[in-house]
Image (cartoon, rainbow, N blue to C red):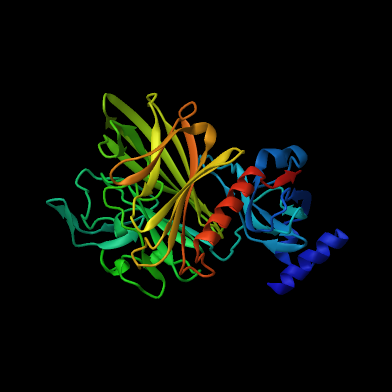
Amino acid sequence: MRGLQLCLAVALAASITCDGAKRNGLYSSILVLKVNNPSPLSRIDEPVVLDVRAIKEKAPTFNPKAFLLLADSEEIASQANDLDADGQPEAIVAVLDFAPNAERTLSLRYAPSGAAERSYKKRSYAELSIKSGGRFVERKYVGGQFMNVRSLRVPREHTDHSEFIRYEGPGWESDRIGYRFYLDWRNAIDIFGKKVPDIVLRSVGQDGFESYHQMSTWGMDILKVGESLGIGSIGMWLGGKAHRVSTTDSVFCEIVLDGPVQSLVRTKYFGWQLGDGSYDLVSELSIIAGSRITTHSLSISGDPPNLCTGIVKDPSAELFFAKGGGEWGYLATYGKQSLANDSLGMAIIFRQSDLIECTEDEHSHVLVLRPQNGRLVYHFLGAWEQEPGGIKTKQEFVKYLEQTLQRLEQPVVVTY
């Protein structure tokens, strides 16, 4: 691989083809991009999103099915995302480090036609694993073996603890942290704390529900969700209470992305019944390599009065609510609130223009938010002290949140 990278570097410097590298010969066309960090912050594993339409305006022959992305002549992990599965990727995603106020040069090498496989170390992952070969008996799945699937229309027989879905729902992770949500009437999001940077979800829950509630070499389930919103779960604020997505006509869940850089879980809830309304809701949960943050993108029909999200209440945790002068604010808690009896920080990052009120009910600290034209985006995160290089004090957690807001307020700028 080092020889191949050297060959690529020579090709870029001298605009020639390296005869000894078949792969490099394939990617014979070059487009140069500039990416600027406009802030005084150092950025590690900063997401860089390249718009394929903008690329094709500059390079009409660009082929998102056969390309390499290089930073300063070194190949970096990247992936092409086709979110609507029409065969035409909309974006290329990578992560890159930046010094304060620094500019990086990226090179796209591509083949004008054809397709080519690329392989990179996985730093993100998403899965949905169900049992096959058995059957439901009184809403319990008996027999069978777990197998990963790309999608699932949730059977009507399925409920909580039916032993049909491994760890009870889909999971997604980066090399920093993992999450899951209960794909049943609870529809709440939970946290897997990770002590290692490896992809671990493939092995979680293979032996049942109990093992991941005990500390292991990789980590454990670190959040008690109960009747709360857990971390970042969807709800609606009605009658002084947060109501999770519970009663629906049907639910369809799919793994849309499972890439080395970004992974995404999409869930469609049809006929969510609440109060006098019925709503169709689409949830997209995505995570990027090197990040603790899950981005939650929602679209909903039926003109709801609001959507809400929040964080489970814990008497051991201190509550923070910050509204700065910019676009984003946060609701956060920090303290010895993990199931490992150690420090865990949790936060929801929201657009201030979406905020109706910050409130609470018996179980959760709640943000009541206003969808704009049926759409809403917010971010949520957990920061566990036992993760590699983990945050270990309240002061470190608040600093991390403030820097996260600054990164959102001043995203990197791509010049094509």
Above/below status of 252 relative to 257: above
Q: Position of residue 372 (x, y in %)?
A: 49, 28
Q: Position of residue 114 (x, y in %)?
A: 65, 51
Q: Position of residue 205 (x, y in %)?
A: 31, 65
Q: Is residue 25 visible?
A: yes
Q: Observer-nearest residue: 6 or 166?
A: 166
Q: Residue at x 35, y 50 (%)?
A: 230
Above/below status of 11 relative to 35: below
Query: Considering the image in quadrants, where does the N terminus appear?
Result: bottom right
Quarter residue 72 falls in:
bottom right
Q: Observer-nearest residue: 125 or 342?
A: 342
Q: Observer-nearest residue: 88 or 351?
A: 351
Q: Position of residue 71 (x, y in %)?
A: 74, 59
Q: Is residue 20 visible?
A: no
Q: Residue furthest bottom?
A: 217
Query: Considering the image in quadrants, where does the C terminus appear?
Result: top right
Quarter residue 251 falls in:
top left
Above/below status of 323 relative to 11: above
Q: Residue furthest right?
A: 14
Question: Does 390 sit left or right of 6 as displayed?
Answer: left
Q: How many marks?
A: 0
Question: Does 34 sit left or right of 204 as displayed?
Answer: right
Q: Residue furthest left?
A: 138
Q: Residue at x 54, y 62 (%)?
A: 123
Above/below status of 36 relative to 166: above
